[in-house]
Amino acid sequence: MENFLELLNTAFIAEYEDVFLYLRESSIFKKKIAGGEKLAEIFEDFSVMELKHADLLAMKLIKLGGRPTWQFRQIDDSASLKDTLQRHVISESRLYKIYTDLIDACADRNFKIVLKGIRDNEKEHLEKVTYLLKKIKF
């Protein structure tokens, strides 16, 4: 159970950090990239989804007797668009694996369904940032 709680908190931290990261990057894209509004909109949508994920994970952690923990981390916004998208490919791939591990370790059938839904969202994010990375000319 302790390992499950640790993994759940790891996912919570990643989701919560992505809320801020996607919002920050969307703001930068609007200002620095010609036509960046569309990309900013995609990242803002991702941010809302990540917040919902973080909320679901926090509620489950509390229900299981754990405590969601997160510490502020400075957001590095100096990366190029290409670097930003590559970073998200890595992050979303990592989260997809974490959710697969959580699903495998989860005994609660109903929460397993929730985790599969979140994992599907992460897969969509991964596919979208991978597509953007291939489509955008740098």
Image (cartoon, helix red, strand yellow):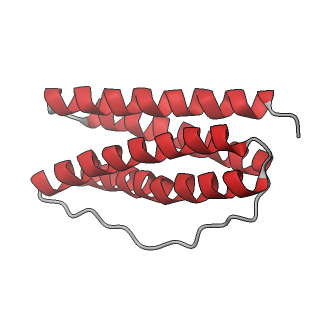
Q: Is residue 49 visible?
A: yes
Query: Is residue 60 found left or right of 128 in the rendered image?
Result: left
Farthest residue toward the right? 138
| Residue 135 higher or lower than 55, as above or below | above
Query: Is residue 115 found left or right of 93 in the rendered image?
Result: left
Most foreground residue, 7 or 24: 24
Most foreground residue, 44 or 123: 44
Percent across and percent down for residue 89 are 64, 39
Query: Is residue 116 found left or right of 25 in the rendered image?
Result: left
The mark tally for this picture is 0
Percent across and percent down for residue 115 are 30, 33
Most foreground residue, 32 or 96: 32
Q: Is residue 1 visible?
A: no
Percent across and percent down for residue 80 are 79, 54
Q: Residue at x 41, y 45 (%)?
A: 48
Q: Residue at x 78, y 28 (%)?
A: 134
| Residue 128 higher or lower than 69, as above or below | above
Q: Residue at x 18, y 60 (%)?
A: 66
Query: Is residue 87 found left or right of 59 in the rendered image?
Result: right
Percent across and percent down for residue 54 are 33, 50
| Residue 12 higher or lower than 129, as above or below | below
Which image quadrant: the C terminus?
top right
Q: Residue at x 18, y 51 (%)?
A: 59
